[in-house]
Amino acid sequence: MTRQKEPVRKEGNPPAHVAFVMDGNGRWATSRGLPRLAGHREGIANVEKIAIALKKRGVRYMTIYMFSTENWKRPKEEVDGIFDLLVEWFRDTVPCLMAQGVSIRHYGKPDRLPSGLAEALHEAAATSRGDDFVLGLAIDYGGRAEIVDAIRSVVSASHGGEHIDESAIADALYTSGVPDPDLIVRPGGELRLSNYMLWQAAYAELYFIPVLWPDFDELELDRALKAFDERHRRFGGL
Ligand code: IPE
Ligand code: IPE
Ligand code: MG
């Protein structure tokens, strides 16, 4: 038996939770003869537009994969540049999002992030009120690391492990309390999850498109939502 949250969506309704892999920022920039960081700037700026568009369409949860546990392998200059852009975004844009009823959550561990970014994430999450629309930011996020952390915490809280079940693990994930994504959208042309929401993706509908994230606009969003609406979800039943 599992107490895991049932998907909230009914046929014809928007998905409750849409999760995105923000991919293709680098290629967007290089194809224009620009430095990769220009693509990251454009990609980060696009998060606000898509969040507001999803909120208007009645979606309650959006998650965006912004920096993976594997992205530390990139040149230091790019990693530092991405973090600087994120700090700027927290300063200039996140307060506007929050003023429009968007709550912020961080999925990942703050420990390795520059202190300015870790503080900005903490501050935004701590001052978020309500759950009209929850924007989850997966930063220094890895699906495997998340599962390891969850197992550590349930093992330390359980006596001998006999009470460990699917719901205990789900409740110990970074996304605790958030329904699993109904739809995972990956722009950028790659057909993989790259360590994203490995547990939560169990029954997500997957949508892959070649469009690069900075070009992912409301038209593309509506295409993704329409494709989702046309899927028949069975969850193992008939
Ligand atoms: C996604 O864009 C952002 C991060 C992974 C930080 P990429 O930087 O992966 O862009 P491409 O895939 O190289 O074009
Ligand atoms: C996935 O994109 C990680 C994020 C978007 C944060 P990557 O560009 O790192 O994925 P791979 O390397 O193509 O699998
Ligand atoms: Mg990429």
Image (cartoon, rainbow, N blue to C red):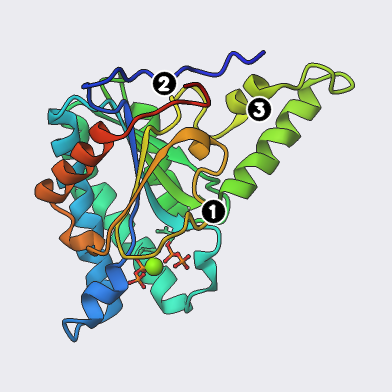
Quarter of the image holding residue 160?
top right
Q: Earlier in the sequence, mark 2 or mark 1?
A: 2
Q: Which amino acid type is marked by label 3?
A: Ile
Could you give the CA–CA distance between mark 2 and mark 1, rounded to whole angstroms?
A: 22 Å
> What residue sits 52% from the left and 47% below the top?
110
Q: Read off the residue under disc 1.
A: 195
| Quarter of the render that holds ligand 1 | bottom left
- Toward the front, the furthest residue is 238
Where is residue 84 shown, x and y percent of the image? 34, 63
Residue carrying label 3? 169
Q: Nearer the viewer, residue 203 or 134?
A: 203
Mark nearer the viewer, 2 or 1: 2
Q: Are dots 2 and 1 in contact, CB under 8 Å?
A: no
- Residue wearing tag 2: 7
10 Å neighbourhood of mark 3: few (<14), some, or many (≥20)? many
Please state which of residues 156 and 126 is positioned toward the viewer in this rendering.
156
Is 50 positioned to the left or the right of 204 in the image?
left
Is 216 placed above or below 3 here? Answer: below
Q: Is mark 1 within 8 Å of ligand 2?
A: yes
* Residue nearer the viewer, 71 or 11: 11
Instruction: Look at the image and tell me in which quarter the N terminus lies.
Output: top right
Q: Which mark is residue 157?
A: none
